[in-house]
Image (cartoon, helix red, strand yellow):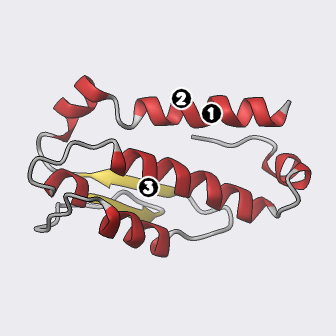
């Protein structure tokens, strides 16, 4: 997701572009994690945030509530113009994305909200 005119939008909201983009990413990534199915909590716990390249491998951890994963992602989120990757490498995550759209629907929602706010 590319945020165009982040500086202009941020000025209207009385914040820096870095604060604005960080807030957008926190909201997006939190929503993706919380919309992920959690039978065992493994798929939720395997959302990994990295910069400059996607994460490789998966984690041997579980987080049914999603709060530990969200906290970890929030703490690892870097500011500035770095590329942020939210990756989930469990083998079955693609099947659930096709069925539930936890990534696709949240990107669409955030983009719609940004467009509305920008007007």
Label 3 to label 1, Cα distance in Å? 17 Å
Does dot 3 land on a helix, a strand or a loop? strand
* 109 vs 38: above or below: above
Q: Mark 1: few, some, or many residues within 10 Å (few <14, many ≥20)?
A: some
Residue at the image position 82 percent from the left and 35 percent from the top: 118
Residue tagged 3:
85
- Residue 91 in percent (x, y) is at 11, 44
**Quadrant of the frame with the C terminus:** top right
- Residue 62 in percent (x, y) is at 15, 64
- Residue 37 in percent (x, y) is at 21, 42
- Among numbered discs 3 and 1, the one appearing first in the sequence: 3
* Horizontal side of residue 52 vs 66, given as left or right: right
Does dot 1 land on a helix, a strand or a loop? helix
Q: Say whether marks 1 and 2 touch (CB < 8 Å).
A: yes
Does dot 2 land on a helix, a strand or a loop? helix
**Which numbered circle lies on residue 108?**
2
Label 3 to label 2, Cα distance in Å? 17 Å
* Horizontal side of residue 27 vs 116, given as left or right: left
* 15 vs 75: above or below: above
Residue tagged 1:
111
Q: Mark 2: few, some, or many residues within 10 Å (few <14, many ≥20)?
A: few
Q: Is residue 46 visible?
A: no
Quarter of image, res 73:
bottom left
């Amino acid at each position: 997701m590319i945020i165009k005119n982040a500086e202009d939008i941020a000025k209207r909201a009385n914040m820096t572009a870095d604060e604005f983009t960080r807030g957008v990413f926190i909201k997006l990534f939190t929503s993706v994690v919380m919309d992920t199915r959690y039978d065992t909590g493994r798929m939720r716990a395997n959302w990994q945030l990295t910069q400059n390249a996607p994460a490789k491998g998966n984690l041997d951890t579980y987080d049914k509530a999603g709060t530990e994963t969200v906290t970890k992602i929030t703490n690892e989120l870097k500011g500035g113009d770095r590329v942020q990757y939210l990756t989930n490498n469990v083998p079955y995550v693609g099947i659930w994305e096709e069925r539930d759209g936890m990534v696709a629907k949240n990107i669409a929602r955030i983009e719609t909200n940004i467009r509305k706010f920008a007007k």
